[in-house]
Image: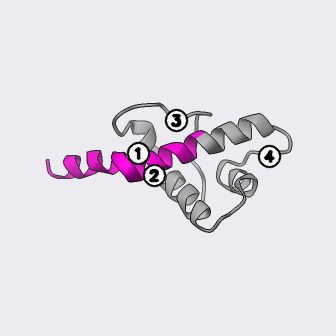
Amino acid sequence: MTTPAFDDCPPESDGVTPYDERHFATYLRLLDAAAEAADWREVVRIVFELDPEIEPDRARLVYDTHMSRAQWMTEKGFRDLLRASRI
């Protein structure tokens, strides 16, 4: 599975963004890996194709910010999707 082009940090927004829409599968992969207690370094290698040994700070930033956004989607972002589907 190929991850769409990604920014180091997803956009911060109170609503679902086009970036979020492109990365739904990425967010699900991160959440699944967390549920399985996967090591973040292995996850960032697989999902983002980043080497945490070569770019440790960037790899951690990408993982943390995308995981945070994935969790936001499960807590709040999904409401936007439900509202949009009623239109």
Distance from the alpha carbon under mark 4 to that under mark 2: 22 Å
The residue beneath circle 3 is: 10
**Sequence-earlier tag: 4 or 2:** 2
Q: Amino acid at mark 1?
A: Glu
Q: Point out the tag, 1 or 3, that comes first from the N-terminus.
A: 3
Q: Which residues are magenta?
A: 65-87
Label 1 or label 3, whichever lies nearer to me, is 3
Residue identifier under label 2: 24
Distance between the Cα atoms at labels 1 and 4? 25 Å
Mark 2, secondary structure of its residue: helix
Answer with mark 3 or mark 4, whichever residue precedes in sequence: 3
Is residue 1 visible in the rendered image? The answer is yes
Residue wearing tag 1 = 21
Work out which residue is located at the far top of the displayed protein and give it.
12
The residue beneath circle 4 is 51
Please state which of residues 44 and 76 is positioned toward the viewer in this rendering: 76
